[in-house]
Image (tube, grey):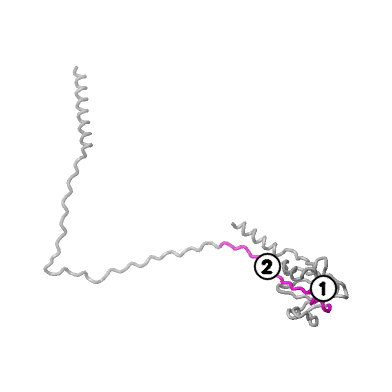
Amino acid sequence: MARVLFLAGVFLALIHLAPAYDFYVGGRDGWVAKPAESYNLWAESMRFQVGDKLVFIYKTGKDSVLLVKEEDYNSCNTQNPIKKFDDGHTIFQFNRSGPFFFISGAAGHCSQGQKLVVVVMATRKPIPPPTSSPPHASPPSVPSPAEPPSSSPSPSPAPGNPSQPPAASPPSPTPSPRPSSAHNVALSRISNGFLALFLGAVFLG
């Protein structure tokens, strides 16, 4: 059992230490307006964890990637980004769990579907295998103190009704030998008598 728990702990630790992955947004098409597949549908089919990276491929000088707040994402507001990337090959690494909101910085592209929401899963920490604790010894049972004898005197017999001594039980009769035993004794004696007579006749004859 201890070996199984140890292997389970090692397995969880390996999952936690798994290498990060690079996710290419849009696949071959990259980061473009009017994508063939909704970026959010693509993101919903993926599992993002802390340490993973998003890779945005787009034309330098004609497009950009903006990390924005949720309200700016919903309204396609490009004027107040948290971060802006315009190098044409943007790599964004997740440093925490929770939602991230991205939109295009090009005019009108966000309203044409060039926007993305990614939800990063919480960090999974390995669970240490439980240690078996020794059984607790139950405390010895303490005998309860004996009750003291009652100090109240026993009531005396009422006058006129003297207590009578208990009647003696009649003696039990001596059991007689069982018929089978008496019969066996008689047969034994008869046999011995015949044997004595036979031996006497032999010696005297």
Q: How many marks?
A: 2
Residue drawn at (83%, 79%), measured in percent from left and top?
Answer: 107
Front-most of 107 and 127?
107
Residue 69 position by quadrant: bottom right
Q: Main secondary structure of the magenta part?
A: loop
> Contact, CB < 8 Å: mark 1 with mark 2?
no
Front-most of 95 and 129?
95
Residue 33, numbered label: 1
Residue 124, numbered label: 2
* Helix, strand or loop at mark 2: loop
Farthest residue in the bottom direction? 79
Residue drawn at (27%, 70%), measured in percent from left and top?
Answer: 150
Write the start and end of the magenta stretch as one range.
106-132
Front-most of 162 and 97?
97
> Picture coordinates of residue 61 (x, y %)?
88, 75
Residue 46 position by quadrant: bottom right
Front-most of 147 and 184?
184
Question: Which amino acid type corresponds to the residue marked 1 in the rendered image?
Answer: Ala
